[in-house]
Image: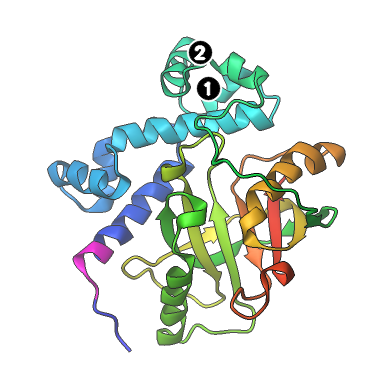
Amino acid sequence: MNFKITTKEIYQKQMNIVIEYINNHLHETIDLSKLAEMSHFSLYHFHRITKAFLKEPIGSYIIRIRLEKAARLLRYTDLPISDIGYKVGYDIPSSFSKAFKQLYKITPLEFRKNKDYIVKKKDKENIDILLDIDKPKIVEIPAKKVIYISLSGKYSELDFSNTWKRLWKFVKSNKLYSGEIENICIYYDDPKITYLEKLRTDVCLVILDDVKPQGEIGVKEIKGGKFAKFLYKGSYKYFRDVYNTIYADLIPANNLLLRDAPIFEKYINHPGRVVPEKLKTEIYIPIC
């Protein structure tokens, strides 16, 4: 079976290349003309196309992603502020501090001291529930090859169902099925740091065979390493409280030091086949 590739899917394929490059080179000077060359768009059209896909100018996107990474490092590590600025492309501490304050209305030092600071008030929701989260297991994860579709927006409002269906259709048409396929999502952003409408998620299937990207479906490798694995049993609607418990209680209680890499979730069973209370999710937090 052959898919008919639309112009939008062709553009998405090229955007995946650009976004991955940005994510992996935040500490370097990023040349927009080089990004345009990588995307195979002319520089004139490059800015129009990237703005349409990212919902903001490419330059603004790079600055925001840099500062959001800095905010995570400020909150979850003890790295000196000057070192954090350098890691996200700011050689001069005053330039880093100025840019950070423009985005968050607070200095990096004030942000580090105020662990409860969030960029936007959370939805009001009163929950009184006992969460079923196992103690963390420390595991070494090998690199994983995945096919993926990138989504952006508030996690609870993303169309995961149809995205999974498109990925599985791709698996079937390309004869990629094996018993070792894993359903995972990579979450790049912290809702306390990133505006909800800009949260980034990759919906992924782990595969074994070689395959080329096609349209909106990208192919990449998730880096392996050391992770704290938490098994949560229960409804997806409590994920916010699960993560609050992990970061506020379980990580400090187990003396875990966080590593600068995205978290991901692995879904053990299917929400259409079991009641919400019996759903099982493995949450992988990268640690040193």
Q: Which mark is residue 63?
A: none
Label 2 or label 1, whichever comes before in sequence order: 1
| Numbered circle sitting on residue 93 | 2
**In this view, which residue lies farthest toward the bottom?**
1
Name the side, left or right, on which 280 lies relative to 56: right
Magenta stretch: includes residue 7: yes
Q: What secondary structure is marked by label 2?
A: helix
Residue linked to disc 1: 85
What secondary structure is marked by label 1?
A: helix
x and y, in percent, of residue 25 in the image? 45, 39
Above or below 272: residue 71: above
Residue 79 part of the magenta segment: no
Kind of residue at badge 2:
Pro
Does residue 218 lie above or below 252 as drawn? below
Q: In this picture, which residue range is highlighted in magenta?
A: 5-9
In the rendered structure, which amino acid carries the disc numbered 1?
Gly
Residue at x 60% of width, y 15% of height? 110
Provide residue 219's location: percent of width, then percent of height.
44, 65
Residue displayed at 38% across by 68% down? 213
Question: Residue visible at 41% across and 44% down?
Answer: 197
Q: Quadrant of the C terminus?
A: top right
